[in-house]
Image: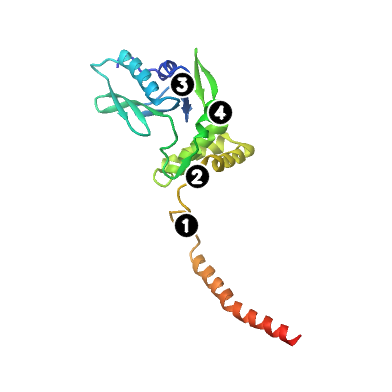
Amino acid sequence: MNKPISVIEILNVLDDDYVLLKKRENFPEYTPGSDIDLLVIDRQWASRRAQNYLIKRINANETILRISEGKKHTHIDICEGKNIILRIDLVDEFDFFTKFSIQGALKTKIFMTRVAQKVGDFKVFTPSLEFDLLIRYLEYIEWFERRPDKIKHLDYILSHADDEQRDRLIENVHRYIRLHHDCWQGKVPAKKGMLMYYLKKIWRLIKKYPKKVMDLGKNKLSK
């Protein structure tokens, strides 16, 4: 590419049909291989708008567009050779999570409460802090078993949220998600020997129970 692709310009052609998720500290700068995650109203419309802009913008001799239309994501990859320079990841629902389901109301709430941030001469739409924290936490709990690097989202929450905002985060987790399993599927953290200790304690209580019933009966008969 003769000139780096501007993320701001891509967002600008989408008008107000998007919310930029998980905005990085160095935005609008990006490093090769970066993702730009966008929640949009209409995924097909947004994809066409972005593609039309990029086709006119890139030098086809050096750069290609690779489009992947999935059921849950649309990926627009700007590539040089086999290397992805920038990926635009479009979603219009939160049905890509596997550990839990997201209520449809969350998308509406994010758009209703989004914030317009000024970047140069442009407006960039991002979630309010309340929902920015929620999205990052959802991604953390979705991936932390498989992607240790997702700890960055938890670090972000701890550094950007006060006690009241963390309480609100927990409320929103219970309000907008439904877990897909009834019990934890991974290993349960426990100190060595604690399981056997509690099993023995329960067994002792079970053994004592018939004796207590018999003693109670004797006391009643004696009265």
Q: Which quarter of the image is occupied by the N terminus?
A: top left
Residue 106 on image: x %, y %: 52, 34
Mark 4: which amino acid?
Answer: Ser
Q: Residue at x 48, y 64 (%)?
A: 192
Give the answer, above or below, for where 196 lies relative to 20.
Answer: below
Q: Residues within 10 Å of mark 2 (few under 14, many from 20)?
A: few
Pointer 4 residue: 128
Front residue of 192 and 146: 146
Give the answer, above or below, for where 179 lies relative to 128.
Answer: below
Count numbered badges in the picture: 4
What's the mark number on residue 188?
Answer: 1
Front residue of 80 and 50: 50
Secondary element type, mark 4: loop
- Mark 2 against mark 1, which lies toward the viewer? 2
Do the residues bearing badges 4 and 3 touch, measured as CB atoms within 8 Å?
no
Q: Residues within 10 Å of mark 4 (few under 14, many from 20)?
A: some
Residue 116 on image: x %, y %: 54, 20
What's the distance in space between the residues labelled 3 and 1, CA to CA? Answer: 43 Å
- Is residue 151 visible to the viewer in this orientation of the structure? no
Secondary element type, mark 3: loop
Secondary element type, mark 2: strand
Give the answer, above or below, for where 140 lies relative to 16.
Answer: below
Secondary element type, mark 1: loop
Residue 212 on image: x %, y %: 64, 79
- Mark 4 against mark 1, which lies toward the viewer? 4
First reached walking from the N terminus: tag 3 or tag 1: 3
What's the distance in space between the residues labelled 2 and 3, CA to CA? Answer: 27 Å
Q: Residue at x 50, y 31 (%)?
A: 107
Pointer 2 residue: 178
